[in-house]
Image (cartoon, helix red, strand yellow):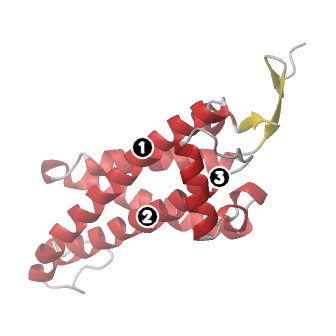
Amino acid sequence: MLNPDRVAGTPKVYVWDPFVRVFHWSLVAGFTIAYFTEGDLLKVHVWAGYVVGLLIVARVLWGFVGPSHARFSDFIYDPATTFRYLRDLVRFRGQRYLGHSPGGGAMVVLLLIFVAATVVTGLVVYGGDQQAGPLAGMFSKATGEAMEGVHELIATITLALVLVHVSAVILASFVHHENLARAMVTGRKRH
């Protein structure tokens, strides 16, 4: 009988809990839908934004109460350690971590901040420009229109961070000889 914790003779260990995995791929879907819809598809854009906002709140809470590798305390490192890790990774000798690496942890924090900022500015735009949503009436139409450029800029920066994240996952997968994207699907990494 095949042991699911061993693949090709390499022992596997359970790292990413179901919440982290579902959150990750749901955020990918929600952000993608929100990024590529607006105008005639404004309702889809708005609802995708609401889902993304709820996901961010849930992930922040999970960062304090979830299992060890989901907790912020497991993957937030000081800047010197993070920069040292990134330097070594691009030199193809970065240390391997079972959970998030210092670079991965920094990216998690950056993405949470920028995705949250995208949601908040989107709520201001929707509340002001459309006089709709939970912030309806709290902002003028002019404020909503003025925030639209900020919202789009933050969303574009977030997309750039996503592209850096994907590139870093590919690089780290190569350097550490493991498929990190598969680990975010199965929850398992080599020990």
Q: Which of these two is toward me, 35 or 153?
A: 153
Amino acid on which disc 1 is placed: Ala
Determine the CA span between mark 2 and mark 3.
25 Å
**Mark carried by residue 44:** none
Determine the CA span between mark 3 and mark 1.
24 Å
Q: Position of residue 145 (x, y in %)?
A: 11, 74
Q: Quadrant of residue 68?
A: bottom right
**Mark carried by residue 101:** 3
* Image quadrant where one finds the N terminus: top right
Q: Residues within 10 Å of mark 3 (few under 14, many from 20)?
A: many
Identity of the residue drawn at 44% across and 40% down = 167
Residue that numbered label 2 is attached to: 53
Q: Earlier in the sequence, mark 2 or mark 3?
A: 2
| Dot 2: element | helix
Residue 5 in the image: above or below residue 38:
above
Identity of the residue drawn at 28% across and 50% down = 35
